[in-house]
Image (tube, rainbow, N blue to C red):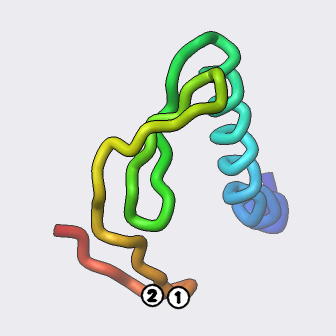
Amino acid sequence: MQEREIQYLEEHIPELAESAVTQAYWQSLAAGNSVLESENGIIYERFPDGSSKMVKTIEPPTTVAIGARRKLL
């Protein structure tokens, strides 16, 4: 592969990852399993019947600028 082709593929990783996560989410629900989902600092358990239950509260998401570096503890 040439550098240009590799760069093109790398640029599409975020959308491919988003698509894979969405597909796994719906496949899990379709198989009758529940799914954990974070929304505005709260973790919810989503069930196949459309209901949800709050599991716990967490720190709200942190906005990070593209290219910024963060140290994970």
Q: Amino acid at mark 1?
A: Ala
From the image, tell me which residue sits under label 1: 65
Where is residue 64 drawn, in percent x and y? Answer: 47, 83
Question: 10 Å neighbourhood of mark 1: few (<14), some, or many (≥20)?
Answer: few
Please tell me whether residue 33 is drawn above or below residue 1 in the rendered image. above
* Residue sitting nearer the eye, 61 or 71: 61
Please tell me whether residue 28 is drawn above or below residue 32 in the rendered image. below
Res 10 label? none
**Direction left: furthest residue:** 73
* Residue sitting nearer the eye, 46 or 51: 51
Helix, strand or loop status at disc 2: loop
* Residue sitting nearer the eye, 33 or 55: 55
* Viewport quadrant of the C terminus: bottom left
Disc 1 to disc 2, how far (Cα)? 5 Å
Res 68 label? 2
Residue at the location (82% across, 67% down)?
Answer: 4
Left or right of 28 in this view: 45: left
Helix, strand or loop status at disc 1: loop
Give the number of the mark in front: 1 or 2.
1
